[in-house]
Image (cartoon, rainbow, N blue to C red):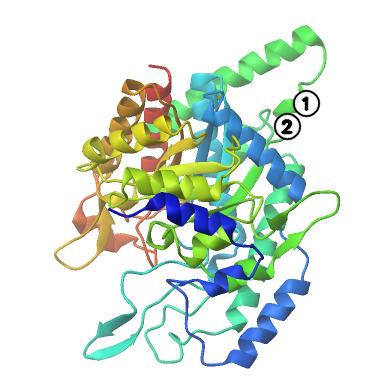
Amino acid sequence: MENYLEKVEAIQAGLWAPGSWQNKTASQQPIYDDDAGLQSSLQRLAQLPPLVTSWEIESLKSQLAQAAEGKAFLLQAGDCSERIEDCQTDAIVGNLKVLMQMSFVLTYATSQRVIRVGRIAGQYAKPRSTETETRGGVELPVYRGDLINRSDFTPEGRRADPELLIRGYERAAMTLNFIRSLIGGGFADLHHPENWDLDFANETPQAKQYHNMVHSIANSLKFMESILDRSVADTKSVDIYTSHEGLHLTYEQAQTQRVPRRDGWYNLNAHFPWIGNRTRHLEGAHIEYFRGIENPIGLKVGPEIKPEELVSLVQVLNPQNELGRITLIHRLGAGGIGKALPPLISAVQKAKQKVLWCSDPMHGNTFQTDSGTKTRRFEAIVDELTQAFAIHRRMESILGGVHLELTGSDVTECVGGATGLTEADLDRAYKSAVDPRLNYDQAMEIAFLIAEEMVV
């Protein structure tokens, strides 16, 4: 049996610096053949303005603390892997519209604050199961996301290109700037929810149910403002936070900085970076890096983890037991959550660790069709999510968030749902370069399901 206590004590005794992770084993890192180019890109990144601010980060942390206590709900959703070429108005607005509509449904049904966190403005790197990919007898490095290489199956396309680090930063900055401009310009104003409509989705059952809800809210808002004889200012803007998997450690380190009048170091690439299930090794480089930053941290939890290992990870990442610091995102699969989740909850409760529990019902339910297309079955996603709510209720725990891969584009990547997508439909509009995403109909079905579960 592993002695986790000794490992935790050894890690906590070590001095931390933004680059101390380099003394640890780092998994899922690209190999560059141009070290001079890599160092040049990293130096430029370190001199560029931060993408987010420390006060935004601290505001999110305080809201996540509320979610951990059942006073708010985390909706974390967006692209599996952003594409540099998709840094376009329609793609950004489409994803933002779905996030807004889903949060609107949850707020209306539960009267709770919804914390909107997008997998956006930085989700350009992806962990992969293998180092290489073979097609027609040709073996090349696997595609790791647009921050690292390209999806083109050519030697040049699959080469790790350090210049893409700059391109990824630039696209993240453009995306975030556009989102802030939209929000500041009234895009999120409850007086004009028609701003969030998606043209292709207006005739779906979920859209009709949503529009009935909007009509009811609009009438109530007009009535309230008539009584008060003034506009309700808080209905005109919302907070949108950014998140991505903090996979590429040299990239993350380049934007890790001290800020005036605050203690500690902040990762200013995103408000809410997370550690993936493939890189959550207790003595590994990713845990070493994340333990020293002040951001709220997500930790993906897969079915292989042991309860005592999870407790040790939380101890290392949150030694002060700060509420809002750690979000545990369990991704256990519909067939495994019933057995795997209760011991994890029990261990965290016994250790009296303050965490926010969040369900990722996507990643444990991926499979390949006979033709080799990666997909997810909507019914399995729903099954895992409903089981998660039931297990947390039974154990007097709080499921305070959901983590989804979805898009505002009219795609066919996950089978099932109210519209009855089949495997034969996948070729019609399968656009993801890595993992399959929920489309609008499926995402809104999930939103209404969550709303029902939260008011039980």
Front-most of residues 264 and 456: 264
The answer to whether 274 appears left or right of 138 in the picture is right
Q: Residue at x 38, y 22 (%)?
A: 452
Name the residue beneath numbered marker 2: 236
Front-most of residues 375 and 327: 327
Q: Which quadrant of the figure has residue 19?
A: bottom right
Vertical order, 83 against 271 (above or below): below
Of the residues shown, which amino acid type is indicated by label 2?
Answer: Lys
Q: Are marks 2 and 1 in contact (CB under 8 Å)?
A: yes
Q: How many residues crowd around disc 1 within 10 Å: few (fewer than 14), some, or many (20 or more)? A: few
The answer to whether 371 appears left or right of 159 in the picture is left
Front-most of residues 184 and 166: 166
The answer to whether 393 appears left or right of 15 in the picture is left
Q: How many residues crowd around disc 2 within 10 Å: few (fewer than 14), some, or many (20 or more)? A: some
Of the residues shown, which amino acid type is indicated by label 1?
Answer: Ala
C-alpha distance separating marks 2 and 1: 6 Å
| Disc marking residue 233 | 1
Residue 65 rendering spot, x and y as whole percentages: 59, 32
Residue 274 rendering spot, x and y as whole percentages: 51, 54
In terms of secondary structure, where does tag 1 sit?
helix
Q: Residue at x 54, y 50 (%)?
A: 317
| Disc marking residue 283 | none
Task: Evaluate whether residue 398 shows in this view.
Answer: yes
Front-most of residues 235 and 292: 292
Q: Quadrant of the C terminus?
A: top left
Residue 236 rendering spot, x and y as whole percentages: 73, 32
Q: Residue at x 73, y 53 (%)?
A: 264
Vertical order, 361 against 151 (above or below): above
Which residue occupies the extreme right position in the image? 261
Vertical order, 68 against 278 (above or below): above
In terms of secondary structure, where does tag 2 sit?
loop
Q: Residue at x 63, y 46 (%)?
A: 241
